[in-house]
Amino acid sequence: DQQVKQNSPSLSVQEGRISILNCDYTNSMFDYFLWYKKYPAEGPTFLISISSIKDKNEDGRFTVFLNKSAKHLSLHIVPSQPGDSAVYFCAASGSNYQLIWGAGTKLIIKP
Amino acid sequence: KAGVTQTPRYLIKTRGQQVTLSCSPISGHRSVSWYQQTPGQGLQFLFEYFSETQRNKGNFPGRFSGRQFSNSRSEMNVSTLELGDSALYLCASSLGFRGRTEAFFGQGTRLTVV
């Protein structure tokens, strides 16, 4: 049973436009959420996180939104750049510290 | 500050052999987690060690085992290798405390079983 779901395996966006990556979770006990970016043959790198006490966190071009009632979070990248092409993973954790990961969404930024 | 170091980077083994992978976490980090990544499967959690104790375990067979040393370095062992074990194995270190679960990943060990 997947507790963290990224339903879009891939997403293609024009350079300069907004990229929106979505993530749904089922466990209401999750209270900390993270987004990671992964290039081929490298380990994932941390992008941005949000605690369940917030509904928005912003860092430069990256903004994460959390809708607890819908158990949904999204990552917005504005404006999208070619270097943003990567696989994006969302992850969630609760009281046992373990990170539960989504399957990833491959973002392709078209020039 | 040195990052997470995984050795070796690449490994080729034959079916039935066993393999040991190593991970050195960021200095001061007490939690080390191991993941298996295969195409289309995302990151599959293997296990997590915190202060030399296994704190969490994923749904992998007993052929996959690990340990953590007093200096927080961790090793992962896979015995009786199968072709399906071919994957990128990633190690992540973190402080390991609630609310501070940002994990830093190594570059991974690419294991190929032939």
Image (tube, coloured by chain):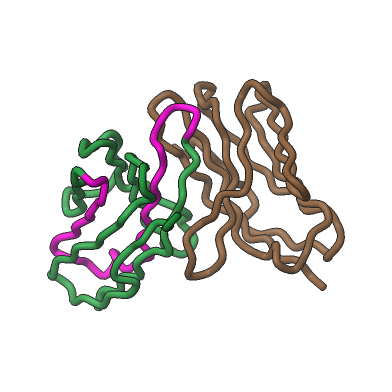
Chain colours: A brown, B green
Residue A105 occupies quadrant: bottom right
Front residue of B94/A84: it is B94
Residue B3 occupies quadrant: bottom left
Q: Please state, as top left, top right, bottom left or bottom right, where the C terminus of chain B lies in the image.
A: bottom left
Residue A108's x, y, as percent? 71, 65
Determine if the magenta segment contains residue A91. no
Question: Taking B20 as reference, is B25 above or below it?
Answer: above
Residue B19's x, y, as percent? 18, 66
Front residue of A69/B47: it is B47
Residue B112 occupies quadrant: bottom left
Question: Taking A95 as reference, is B89 above or below it?
Answer: below
Question: Taking A65 as reference, is A28 above or below it?
Answer: above
Q: Residue furthest front?
A: B1
**Residue sitting at x 32%, y 40%:** B30
Front residue of A11/A100: it is A100
Residue B18's x, y, as percent? 14, 66
Q: Is residue A97 left or right of residue B62?
A: right
Total of numbered circles in the picture?
0
Determine if the magenta segment contains residue B98. yes
Q: In this view, does A102 lie to the left or right of B72?
A: right
Residue B43's x, y, as percent? 44, 52
Question: Taking B104 as reference, is A15 above or below it?
Answer: below
**Residue sitting at x 28%, y 37%:** B50
**Residue sitting at x 42%, y 23%:** A95
**Residue sitting at x 48%, y 55%:** B42
- The boundaries of the magenta stretch are B71-100
Q: Please state, as top left, top right, bottom left or bottom right, where the N terminus of chain B lies in the image.
A: bottom left
